[in-house]
Image (cartoon, rainbow, N blue to C red):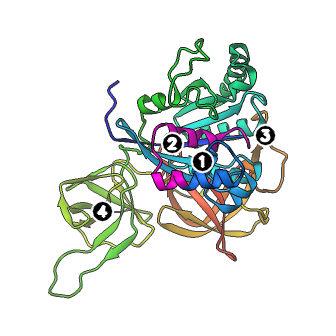
Amino acid sequence: MKIENNQLLRFITSGNVDDGKSTLIGRLLYDSKSIFEDQLQNVKKISERKGNTEIDLTLFTDGLRDEWEQGITIDVAYQYFTTPKRKFIIADTPGHVQYTRNMFTGASTANLAIILIDVINGVTEQTKRHSFIASLLQIPNAIVCINKMDLVNFSEDVYNSIVEEFKEFAEMLSMKDVRFIPMSALAGDNVVEKSSRMEWYKGEPLLHTLETIPIESNINEEDVRFPVQTILRPQSEICQEKRRYIGRLGSGVLREGDEITVLPSGLTSKVKTLYNLDKKAQEVFAPMSISITLEDNIDISRGDMVVKSSNTPNVSQDIEVMLCWLHNNPAKPRAKYFIKHTTNEQKAIIKEIVYKIDIESLEKNYQSEGLHMNDICKVKLKTTKPLIVDLYKKNKVTGSIILIDEATNETVAAGMIV
């Protein structure tokens, strides 16, 4: 497969705490010469101040003062770098269990997940948790990096045993492409350059794999979904231009003359004109910011959705969602929450917890009650007005929701419609 230059690859690093995620990213940036000179000098000074004789690679990503002091990642740290073949956005997600919620932020737009495993600890519960979340979020590619191989004298047998253990677990997940790389992020083995100390490994180092792995688009190109954000009305009676409906095209391709339906009202019309920003266009495609006019003057409000009449989503007040509870405070029984779905915001209640997922075994617990931080579960929601939804696996834009506490305005949960 031919790889286009300047493609953008978004990926996350995940795994247990102290598996070496920040070190890996630091090594990747340092060895690929993607560090600015002033940043490099600053990190050298901080490393010396901490008493390190070598550069502390974690400082390239652990940008918060609390993280430097504690030696951990407590937030999602983003890094950007470019090679002649690709552009990259890295999300370094936290390893502690209490920060699992942050992985949803970093993984929501990722094309690939790097799952780090400490060769000494092997496959842990947090490894399984992050792998399950990556699978749940439909991330199509995964690279399992078995790190700190220098601690086991670069043993092929130890590496193979961990690979088999992960493969056995991954059979229960929906990962399409899983690759394995043995490495030492601290020493640089198999990160940017191929290691001479693991000649038994016949694959490529991490950077080469990142540059050549096929990128699968996470945008649905078939189903037209246009959530209306705002309406631009004619400024005077002299101006005869019809109302423009403005927003970001969530998925699909829209053309002049297409027959459309506005949901939830069910009113129909045809597309008269299309604009990409202020320029007229014959067709537009996701994820463009667009405005449209219709042949008919019909009642459309923020939160409504324009779709092709031949291809409509579900409209319902009862939806089933795979939910991750993000907040320190547990869910309140039968409490009302704001539900945010595309440009639509209304109230909803959690009617029922169908089951929770046991991350260790991936078994479904139908007897569990209550929702606490990091719980992953299937729930039934009831909304005050109908939502226009697709399944998450079919369309990420119209298949995802968040819940917001109406008293504090804090986001308490993120979910995927199933």
Q: Are marks 4 and 1 in contact (CB under 8 Å)?
A: no
Q: Say if 75 sits above or below 165 in the image.
A: below
The one of 181 and 185 positioned closer to us in this rendering: 185
Residue 132 horizontal/vertical position (percent): 67, 38
Q: Which residues are magenta?
A: 18-41
Mark 4 neighbour density, 10 Å: few (under 14) some (14–19) many (20 or more): many
Residue at 41% across / 29% down in the picture? 212
Q: Nearer the viewer, mark 1 or mark 3?
A: 1
User: Looking at the image, is mark 2 or mark 4 earlier in the sequence?
Assistant: 2
**Residue 405's image quarter?**
bottom right
Q: Is residue 145 left or right of residue 18?
A: left
Of the residues shown, which amino acid type is indicated by label 3?
A: Asp
Q: CA distance from mark 3 to mark 4?
A: 43 Å
Q: Provide the residue designation for mark 3.
A: 358
What is the secondary structure assignment of the residue under circle 3? loop
Mark 3 neighbour density, 10 Å: few (under 14) some (14–19) many (20 or more): some
Q: Is residue 360 left or right of residue 414?
A: right
Q: CA distance from mark 2 to mark 4?
A: 36 Å
Q: Are marks 3 and 4 in contact (CB under 8 Å)?
A: no
Question: Is there any visible trace of residue 312 in the rendered image?
Answer: yes
Q: Nearer the viewer, mark 2 or mark 4?
A: 2
Mark 2 neighbour density, 10 Å: few (under 14) some (14–19) many (20 or more): many
The one of 71 and 398 positioned closer to us in this rendering: 71
Q: Provide the residue designation for mark 4.
A: 290
Residue at 54% across / 49% down in the picture? 108
Q: Is residue 289 magenta?
A: no
